[in-house]
Structure formats: structure tokens, C-alpha cells
């Protein structure tokens, strides 16, 4: 049996041979041991123990201080922001002229504090977009649909009619009735056009919906033609031709105070929807609008808000430039909004060794 002294001498001889230019496995062969045995002997000798894990490492210059981490936790636990995710909190702080850290830093601090909890039962949607209409301003393309609201007993429902603007995501019209009807839909369309003053707008308004009977009823179509509105319907058996209408219904039914067990009366349902519409239009920081509210986008206040956020972020970057490896966050929105934007597919043309973009033509709103 080889004792510790022999192992130590063997390791020293091999190290000297390697420093002189010999290859490690050849030096091990000369002593009749394997490379694996050499590594094991080296680790058992205190002189050759790898001490890299015990060395002191300097902290990164861009690391958040304990005070800043505590401030983040206090903000997310405050009554004002306790129900919001960091993606909603960071833009709101920027609107208040405050910058603590980036959105990713908020999430990282929450993970470190074991405060990240998934608050939802749904799975991420699978997007298969199809090109249809495009809007460059408010009141150019509207989308509408009908959804169920549970009533006081099983089998009894109220019907929520909801119209949203494609460009701003603002809810421009809504109503709750006890049945589905093209006549009800016609009344809602007329009321929405009056409130939004669409009759004085020179642009053509497109109203998109699915293929339900209230959407294609004779009364509804006659109202649209009389108002100069162009009707548009989803293609048969295509479930994602009206995605924004489905998305807003999901937002509605996942609100913390939604009544999944049912509304007691029609008045109670209308009162709750009124609350939701006021919150959605005026307070909700929409992720699809880069976290501004629909009413701000509808009134054209988005550029002013984004400029203020840019100033806040630029000041934060100048204060701690070591924390910014790239440019500040992109605070802007596209000027064109497509109902179903076509996805770009990139393929490689091997014959000429280049990338070719394939993009289908997008139909005009008219």
C-alpha cells in the first residue's frame, strides 16, 4: 500500500515533469499510475487542494445595495402595488418620477426573497396570427363580441356586449342584457358612435366580430350600412381571427373581485361591468400598449408619457452607469396596429448563403 509520503513525492515528480514540458498522461505512465489516480492524489494533498472556491471575490459594481433591495420589497408589498406585478409597477414608478431598478431586477429580488408566486390558472396562449385590418389611429377599427356572465342560479346567464378600439384598446361601448339579440347590438353600436363622434370622422370605421347570429343579423347589418360602418367577420372555423376581444374577456374574468359564482341581478352585473370599464380604460397599464392606459393612448398622450419615462431612465443611467450594459428600455409604440400581425418566417437559402424574409401581404383596413 502506498503511503502519503510516496503519493506526495509522485505528485511533485509529475508536476515538475509537466512544468518541464512533458504531457501529463505520459508523466503518469512513467510512474505506472493513471491520470485519474494522479488527480485523486493531488486533491488529497493539502498543498495541491484547489482553493479557488475559498478566495474572496469582489462584488460587481452594478450590484444593488441591501437598502435598494429592501426598498423594492417595500414597494411591491405596499397597499398601492401589492396586487400588481413588476411589469406594471416599474412603469407606474416612472410616471411618478421614480426609478429604483429595472423590471428584471424587481423579479430577481422577488425570487431571492421567495416572493414569486404564479397567480393564474391559465396557460400561455399559442399565437398563430393571421393578417387582417390595420389601424393608425383611434376609431378606425373596432372589435366586438359577447360573453356570458353567470347569473344567480345555474343555467341563467347575462350577456355582456363589449366594443373595443384596436388602436388604443379603449372600451368604446358596452352593455349587459338578459339575452343575445341583433337589436341590442345595433343599439349599442349607435350609442358608441355617438359617444366617440365617429359620424364626424372622415375615416372609414371597420367593425370586426366573429360569426355569431347577433353579429350577422339583418337588423345589425342595416344599422352598420346606415352609419357607414364596414362590417368584418372572422373566417369560418378560425378561432383566433378576433384575438383582442377574447383577450379583454380573459382580463375581465380574472379580475380579483369578479363574481364566478354569479351576479344576483342584472343591475348588479351592470354595476360591476361599469367599474371594470372605468378601471380598464383609465387605470389599467396595458402590456400591449407598453404599460400606458387605453385612455392615454386614445387621447394621444402616449408620446408625452414615454418622453417623461425616458428622462427618468436617462437620469438613473447617469447616476449608475455601471449598471447599464445596454441602452435604456424602449419606451415607444408602433404607429400601426394590426388586428392579426403576420409573423415573419426566416429561411436560409443555402445556394447563396443568405437569409430570406418571407412575409405575407397585409390587407388594408378598407
Image: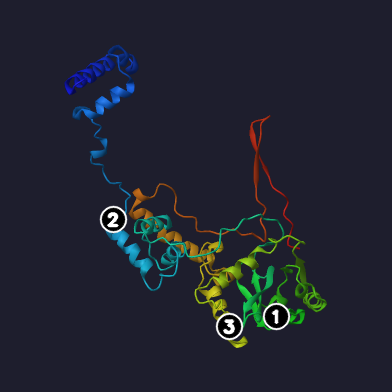
Where is residue 150? Give x, y as percent.
Answer: 61, 79
Residue 45 percent coordinates (x, y): 20, 27
Single out the mark in the foreground, 1 or 3.
Answer: 3
Q: Are marks 1 and 3 in contact (CB under 8 Å)?
A: no
Q: State which quarter of the image contains the C terminus.
A: bottom right
Left/right of residue 162 with respect to residue 26 in the rendered view: right
Q: What separation in Å lies between label 2 and label 3 (alpha carbons)?
A: 49 Å
The residues bearing labels 2 and 1 have C-alpha atoms spaced at a distance of 54 Å
Query: Vertical placement of 12 versus 170: above or below?
Result: above
Tell me, for residue 153, which label it has, or none.
none
List the residue tagged with mark 1: 188
Q: Nearer the viewer, mark 2 or mark 3?
A: 3
Counting residues from the N terminus, which is met first, the one under dot 2 or under dot 1?
2
159 vs 97, nearest the viewer: 159
Q: Is residue 320 visible?
A: yes
The image quadrant of residue 205 is bottom right
As displayed, is residue 11 above or below residue 364?
Answer: above
Q: Secondary structure at mark 3?
A: loop
**What is the CA distance from the residue labelled 1 to the residue labelled 3?**
22 Å
- Say which label, 1 or 3, has the lower sequence index: 1
Residue at the (38%, 59%) spot, across then down: 110
Q: Is residue 127 above or below residue 83?
A: above
Question: Residue visible at 23% across and 41% down?
Answer: 56
Q: Secondary structure at mark 2?
A: loop
> In the picture, residue 242 is in which quadrant?
bottom right
Mark 1 falls on what kind of element? Answer: helix
Q: Which mark, residue 65? A: 2
Disc number placed over residue 263 in the picture, else none: 3
180 left or right of 320 in image: right
Amino acid at each position: 500500500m502506498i503511503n502519503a509520503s510516496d503519493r506526495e513525492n509522485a505528485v511533485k515528480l509529475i508536476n515538475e515533469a509537466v512544468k518541464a514540458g512533458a504531457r501529463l498522461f505520459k508523466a503518469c505512465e512513467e510512474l505506472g499510475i493513471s491520470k485519474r489516480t494522479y488527480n485523486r492524489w493531488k486533491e488529497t494533498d493539502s498543498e495541491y487542494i484547489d482553493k479557488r472556491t475559498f478566495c474572496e471575490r469582489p462584488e460587481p459594481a452594478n450590484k444593488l445595495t441591501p437598502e435598494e433591495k429592501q426598498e423594492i420589497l417595500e414597494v411591491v408589498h405596499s397597499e398601492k402595488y401589492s396586487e400588481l406585478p413588476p411589469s406594471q409597477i416599474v412603469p407606474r414608478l416612472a410616471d411618478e418620477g421614480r426609478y429604483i431598478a429595472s423590471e428584471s431586477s424587481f423579479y430577481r429580488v422577488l425570487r431571492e426573497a421567495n416572493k414569486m408566486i404564479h397567480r393564474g390558472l391559465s396557460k400561455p396562449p399559442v399565437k398563430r396570427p393571421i393578417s387582417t385590418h390595420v389601424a393608425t389611429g383611434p376609431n378606425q377599427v373596432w372589435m366586438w363580441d359577447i360573453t356570458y356572465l353567470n347569473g344567480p342560479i345555474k343555467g341563467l346567464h347575462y350577456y355582456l356586449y363589449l366594443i373595443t378600439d384596436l388602436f388604443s384598446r379603449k372600451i368604446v361601448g358596452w352593455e349587459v342584457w338578459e339575452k343575445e339579440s341583433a337589436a341590442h347590438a345595433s343599439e349599442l353600436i349607435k350609442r358608441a358612435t355617438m359617444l366617440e363622434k365617429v359620424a364626424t370622422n372622415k375615416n372609414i370605421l371597420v367593425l370586426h366580430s366573429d360569426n355569431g347570429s347577433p353579429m350577422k343579423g339583418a337588423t345589425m347589418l342595416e344599422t352598420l350600412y346606415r352609419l357607414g360602418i364596414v362590417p368584418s367577420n372572422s373566417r369560418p372555423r378560425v378561432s383566433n381571427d378576433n384575438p383582442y376581444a377574447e383577450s379583454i374577456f380573459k382580463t375581465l374574468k380574472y379580475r380579483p373581485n369578479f363574481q364566478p359564482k354569479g351576479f344576483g341581478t342584472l343591475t348588479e352585473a351592470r354595476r360591476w361591468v361599469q367599474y371594470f370599464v372605468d378601471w380598464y380604460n383609465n387605470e389599467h397599464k396595458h402590456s400591449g400598449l407598453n404599460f400606458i392606459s387605453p385612455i392615454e393612448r386614445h387621447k394621444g398622450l402616449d408620446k408625452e408619457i414615454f418622453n417623461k419615462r425616458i428622462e427618468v431612465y436617462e437620469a438613473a443611467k447617469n447616476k449608475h452607469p455601471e449598471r447599464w450594459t445596454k441602452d435604456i428600455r424602449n419606451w415607444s409604440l408602433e404607429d400601426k396596429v394590426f388586428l392579426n400581425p403576420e409573423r415573419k418566417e426566416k429561411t436560409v437559402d443555402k445556394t447563396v448563403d443568405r437569409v430570406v424574409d418571407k412575409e405575407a401581404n397585409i390587407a388594408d383596413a378598407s
